[in-house]
Amino acid sequence: MKTITEKLLSGIKQTLETGEKITIDLREASALTGGGDGQGGKTYFDDAFAELRYANPFRQAARVVKESGSSAQFVAKTGNAATQANPWGYSFTPNTGTPGTDTSIWQLPTRVITAQLPIRSAAMSDINYLNETIVEDLMLEFSAIEAASMARNNDQSGTTTTTTGGTDGLRGISSYPISTTAAYGTSGTAITNGLHTLAAISHSATVPDFNMVVDMVNSLPGQYWSLPGTAWHIHPSLISTIRKLKNTAGLPLFQETGGAEGGQLVSMMGFPVIPNAYLDVPGVGSRSMVLANWPRFLTIADVEEMTIQAMEQTAPGFITLYAEKRLVSTVRDPFAGVVLVGI
């Protein structure tokens, strides 16, 4: 059965050769359906589309770099170079004193997300814009998978977090140890190194209040407040609850601080609010809100290529697309963020 393009080219060739008027019949049977409404002819297919997925919100402000290796190592300079007891004056004594300068290193292996899509050959020939829709939706699907892993995965355990990667996934923010003050994790190249301690505020995530928000801001060191990229990442359920906070006059509480515009909580305490559905759902033990300077707090290292390969006739009448994407993510500066832990 000739396609429309083949019929057009054949007709053009014929009229060039003979000089005669050629009538080209563009009616054709669909590869998927025998006829249109029982009358024969081709069924019209509108452009294909996919439901819009929630792309990875961490990429809106996090530091993103390119890498090409099987692992990535991160190095932080720690300690003071100046002698803190008395750093003033021109003189210094070589080879004495303990300024405490050191480095903390950690190394993470590259992780891979894979997918395969079996598609009927007839569908690919019939449905308009199907190829582009598949690729676009696959990119967004990978983005959603990596976001869930960055938020909730425990890369130290493969038994309870396999849907977000487990030991094959990324190191999720929810898996980092917490305390009242931040600290770098142990230094080394083992998978157990680099588990930094994050500063945390404990409060009911289902019954938020104004002081909870203030305490989180106060826990983020002041040097990060005015930097570009400092923002809240909040689970939409918690945003909905915060919107309902009212003052004694019954007015929206955060409207007074310029935070609510048109019913949307777009900023809070001067920092933008980014809805992040991949964080924990508010509840006991949840980490459903993070305030951070994201370019310093979180680093995403992408392998510079994404692979998509089409394999024909892996099953009769089907084409199978194989795809993979590789990346690493880590909390890079544990002092640059603070998390809310639900109680």
Image (cartoon, grey):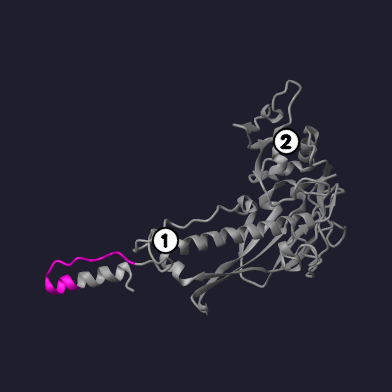
Q: Is residue 196 left or right of residue 109?
A: right
For marks 1 and 2, the one nearer the N-term is: 1
**Residue 110 percent location from the top left of the image:** 68, 69
The residue sitting at 79% across, 42% down in the picture is: 205
Report, in whole angstroms, how far the alpha carbon at label 1 lies from the one at label 2.
Answer: 44 Å
Residue 302 falls in image quadrant: bottom right
Q: Residue furthest top?
A: 249
| Image depth: mark 1 or mark 2 in front | 1
Residue type at the position of mark 1: Asn
Magenta-drawn stretch contains 99: no
Residue type at the position of mark 2: Ile
Task: Please identify the dominant SS of the magenta region.
Answer: loop
The residue sitting at 73% across, 41% down in the picture is: 238
Q: Residue furthest front?
A: 38
* Tag 1 residue: 128
Q: Is residue 86 above or below residue 160?
A: above
Q: Is residue 51 above or below residue 19?
A: above
Q: Is residue 25 left or right of residue 343?
A: left
Instruction: Read off the magenta span.
Output: 14-28
Q: Which mark is residue 242?
A: 2
